[in-house]
Amino acid sequence: MTLINTSFLSELQIKKENLGAAIGPKWISTQGASIKSISPVDAAVIGTVNLVTEKEYNQVVTAAKEAFFTWRLIPAAQRGEIVRQIGNALRVKKMALGKLVSYEMGKSLQEGLGEVQEMIDICDFAVGLSRQLYGLTIHSERPAHRMYEQWHPLGVVGIISAFNFPVAVWAWNSMLAWVCGDVCIWKPSEKVPLTAIACQKIVQKVFETNEVPPGICGLVIGDASIGKIMAEDSRISLISATGSTRMGKSVAAAVGARLGKSILELGGNNAMIITKNADLEIAVPGAVFGAVGTAGQRCTSTRRLLIHESQFEAMKSKLINAYQQIAIGNPLDEQNHMGPLIDQDAVKTYESALVKIAAEGGKIVIEGGVLTGNEYTSGCYVKPCIYEMNQHHKMVREETFAPILYLFKYKNLNEAIQIQNNVPQGLSSAIMTNNLRESELFLSHAGSDCGIANVNIGTSGAEIGGAFGGEKETGGGRESGSDAWKAYMRRQTNTINYSKELPLAQGIKFDI
């Protein structure tokens, strides 16, 4: 393995030993266990972090509650101005933060830089949104009355993020929450703690410069027990959680028990349909990036490829050719297309999936396996693989967070849509076709049951301008663009009587 230049760590103020909690610029002496952040790129220990205990968590929540009472009264446009400055601060640190994302998580440098760009983009989106937190004016049925609705800040927003997008998901939530007048507490995945520390240090300077309360931006790095405490904490007005379906069900149960609010972004098991009218020249790169990008560790990764029988052999041949050209190795080397899985546990899950696929009779198209050699010393590098399957195989209904692609053959589009929808997950979907009727059917009520449905673009084609999320076991929440901001606010309906009388609704008489 080539020696990696880690000068970006000092630029981001990442130390060998790091504290696991912060209230703005104030770092708290955390008393929990010390964990190592180990790069899946070369197995090097990047740094250590002391996890939070419930005591430090409570300190952060208390500060957040206090800060909220000040932050909510600052005009939304001023809050937007602060977020604009955060966007500029991220621009300055884009390369360094992108490298850290790549090194700590394992995605390619271009993907790491792209993730930081998403952070910058959502800042821009939120700045515009800060002047557009509109309510409705409503005609009253009573004379000389006016009705309207307005949106108020919600309170403390708890953000639980996953390792695969270690910085973007936090930004999607926090930037919108901040312009809405909320304060945020972030619990990142303990698999990628250093990216969270780097983000905290970037944004805290902006808040300091603007002389606002430090509790607006809180950080707690802990294990699942802290996530459970957060989910059960009635002081947290909204929990936005990204992760596995198993984790999401646990969070939903805890938040629901206290009648709290939640946004859940959970598993995806995404399919792309290749119709008889598809242009394979765009279908192939869309499918390959969808399956191999981020080593198959995107919630929007392409897991299933449903190919019309007339296109099946041609598409399979093109996929085999494309897969032979995929360069696997150090993700910081821009010549490589695919880096490692996040850790050894992920590798074991991948290997277990291959065993199960074989047991079910999956037909090998591109064989999988763990890579060995000088370039793969971390043991986290695996081969992207392809198997022919049918919809009755159990494995195709499960999401394996790895570069495993299943091929299916179908006869007609209704059959393909049925196969696509016949899984518990419902995040992203795509169809490749040049036929208007096919694309419109796919987008209709009788088409895809996913939160995202794309035409002639892969399943990984989400943009910050659209509300991101899915249906069924994906959770059902929405974050990022469109009107997702409403989840971070509370709606209030107001009726004003400017007459000298008090008419009752529906013409009711109540004379006393």
Image: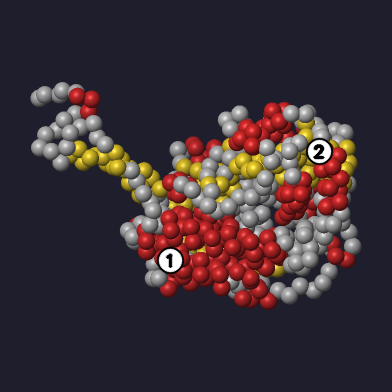
Residue 416: % across, % down: 72, 31
Q: Nearer the viewer, residue 202 or 66?
A: 202
Count numbered badges in the picture.
2
What SS does tag 1 mark?
helix
Q: Quadrant of residue 279?
A: top right
Determine the residue positioned at 55% across, 56% down: 170
Q: Is 293 drawn above or below residue 195 in the view shown?
A: above
Would you say 172 lies left or right of 416 here?
Answer: left
Would you say 150 lies left or right of 44 here?
Answer: left
| Coloration of the structure image | secondary structure
Q: Where residue 503 is drawn, which disc sits there?
A: none
Would you say 24 lies left or right of 389 here?
Answer: left
Residue 227: % across, % down: 57, 49
Q: Is 281 drawn above or below residue 495 in the view shown?
A: below
Q: Nearer the viewer, residue 496 or 320?
A: 320
For disc 2, the marked residue is: 311
Characterize the local packing of mark 2: few (<14), some (14-19) or many (20 or more) Cα atoms within 10 angstroms: some
Determine the residue positioned at 46% across, 58% down: 126
Determine the residue positioned at 63% across, 55% down: 165
Q: Where residue 82 is drawn, which disc sits there?
A: 1
Q: Amino acid at mark 2?
A: Gln
Would you say 28 lies left or right of 11 here?
Answer: left
Q: Amino acid at mark 1?
A: Ile
Residue 388: % across, % down: 84, 37
Determine the residue positioned at 38% across, 45% down: 490
Residue 359: % across, % down: 87, 35
